[in-house]
C-alpha cells in the first residue's frame, strides 16, 4: 500500500513534531509519542526544532500547520486525529491545506474487507469507512496493528506526515514505513553517546559550552536529575554529521581533554 515517491524539499531545513488531540492539551493523556518521534527523527539525521500540541480544532490545526509551512519546515510529523470519532479531523484539514479532495482509499478498503472477511457487496461499517479516508494524491502507510492508515502529503516546501495516536500503532508505522523514509530523506547523519562525567553541573556546563563552540554541529546536555555525586553526571553528546562536520569521536576527544584538564574523568554510561 505504501507509495514512496514523496520527497522533502530541503533536508537541512528544520523538522517539527506535532501532537493532535484535545485529550493531550487538557492533560488527560500524556504525550509520549512526541519525545519518542523526536529522538528517532534526530537519529535519522533531522534537525528537530519544535514540538507542538494542538486540540482537535480544525482552525487551530490549520494555523499550526500554516505556521510551520511559513517557517519552511522540511517535515511536520504529526500523531492523532485519524480515528472514527467526529472530532478526528486531521485528514480533512490536511486535504484542505493541500488543495485536494478527501477520498476513501481503495487499498485501505480492500485491506479492511480482507481483515474483516467481508465480501465486495457487504457494507463497510461506518467507523471503518471514515478511517479509510486520506487526502487524494497522498502517500499512504498501512497500519498493521490498527485500522486508520498514516499518510504524507507535501504542501509547498513542507511534508505533512500523519500517524495514528495510539503509541503501538505509531511505532509500528515508524518502524515499517516512515523510519526508513526519514533515513532516506535526512541521510541518517546523527551519532550520539551518553557518558558519565565526575563533575557537578556548575563545573561541567562551561566545558560543554566550549565543546559546542569548537564543534558547531554538536549538542551536549547534562542531566542533573539522573546524576549521582558518587558516580557522575550523565552527559549526552549528539553530533549531526554533514559536509565537513566533526565526527562523534572528535567531539568526545575534545570533551575528554577538557574534563581531564579540570581534574575530573569521563566514565562509561552503565
Image (tube, grey):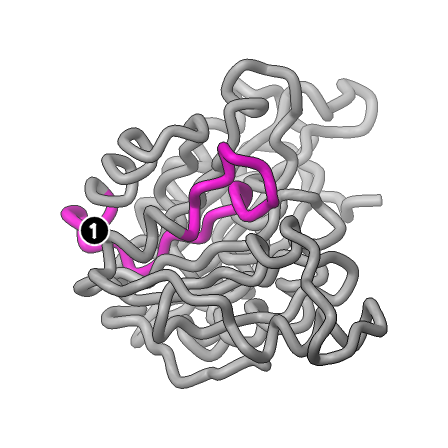
Q: Residue farthest to the front?
A: 121
Q: Quadrant of the N terminus?
A: bottom right
- Classify 152 as above or below 207: below
From the viewer's perspective, is 184 left or right of 243?
A: right
Across and down, in percent, residue 94 comes to: 34, 53
Across and down, in percent, residue 218 comes to: 42, 52
The residue nearer to you, when weighing 181 against 62, is: 62
Q: Callout 1: few (<14), some (14-19), or many (20+) C-alpha neighbours within 10 Å?
A: many
> Residue 81 in magenta?
yes
- Classify 36 as above or below 104: above
Asked whether the viewer can see residue 41, the reply is yes
Q: Residue at x 67, y 47 (%)?
A: 194
Across the whole image, how many numbered discs are drawn on residues?
1
Q: Residue at x 42, y 66 (%)?
A: 103
Q: Quadrant of the C terminus?
A: top right
Q: Residue at x 30, y 54 (%)?
A: 14
From the viewer's perspective, is 227 left or right of 93?
A: right
Give the quarter of the image for residue 176.
bottom right
* Residue assigned mark 1: 69
From the viewer's perspective, is 133 left or right of 199?
A: left
Across and down, in percent, residue 154 comes to: 29, 66
Across and down, in percent, residue 59 comes to: 27, 31
Q: Residue at x 70, y 76 (%)?
A: 121
- Classify 82 as above or below 117: above
> Residue 195 in magenta?
no
- Classify 57 as above or below 65: above
Q: Secondary structure at mark 1?
A: helix
The residue nearer to you, when weighing 242 against 43, is: 43
From the viewer's perspective, is 133 left or right of 232?
A: left
The residue nearer to you, when weighing 188 against 214, is: 188
Asked whether the viewer can see residue 253, the reply is no
- Tell me which segment is drawn in magenta: 68-91
Amino acid at each position: 500500500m505504501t507509495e514512496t515517491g514523496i520527497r522533502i524539499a530541503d533536508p537541512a531545513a528544520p523538522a517539527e513534531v506535532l501532537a493532535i488531540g484535545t485529550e493531550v492539551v487538557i492533560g488527560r493523556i500524556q504525550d509520549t509519542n512526541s519525545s519518542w518521534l523526536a529522538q528517532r527523527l534526530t537519529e535519522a539525521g533531522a534537525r528537530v526544532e519544535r514540538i507542538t500540541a494542538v486540540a482537535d480544532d480544525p482552525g487551530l490545526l490549520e494555523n499550526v500547520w500554516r505556521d510551520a509551512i511559513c517557517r519552511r519546515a522540511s517535515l511536520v510529523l504529526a500523531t492523532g486525529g485519524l480515528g472514527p470519532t467526529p472530532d478526528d479531523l486531521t485528514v480533512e484539514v490536511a486535504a484542505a491545506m493541500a488543495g485536494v479532495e478527501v477520498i476513501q482509499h481503495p487499498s485501505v478498503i480492500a485491506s479492511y474487507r480482507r481483515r474483516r472477511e467481508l465480501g465486495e457487496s457487504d457494507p463497510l461499517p461506518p467507523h471503518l469507512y471514515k478511517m479509510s479516508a486520506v487526502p487524494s494524491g497522498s502517500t499512504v502507510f498501512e497500519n498493521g496493528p490498527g485500522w486508520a492508515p498514516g499518510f504524507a502529503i507535501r504542501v509547498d516546501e513542507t511534508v505533512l506526515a500523519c500517524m495514528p495516536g495510539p503509541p503501538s500503532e505509531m511505532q509500528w508505522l515508524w518502524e515499517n514505513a516512515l523510519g526508513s523514509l526519514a533515513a532516506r530523506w535526512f541521510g541518517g547523519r546523527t551519532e550520539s553517546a551518553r557518558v558519565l562525567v565526575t563533575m557537578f553541573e556548575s563545573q561541567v556546563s562551561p566545558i560543554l559550552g566550549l565543546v559546542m563552540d569548537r564543534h558547531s554541529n554538536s549538542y551536549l546536555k547534562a542531566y542533573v536529575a539522573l546524576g549521582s555525586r558518587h558516580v557522575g553526571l550523565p552527559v549526552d553528546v549528539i553530533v549531526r554529521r554533514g559536509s565537513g562536520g566533526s565526527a562523534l569521536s572528535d567531539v568526545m576527544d575534545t570533551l575528554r581533554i577538557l574534563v581531564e584538564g579540570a581534574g575530573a574523568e569521563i566514565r562509561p554510561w552503565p
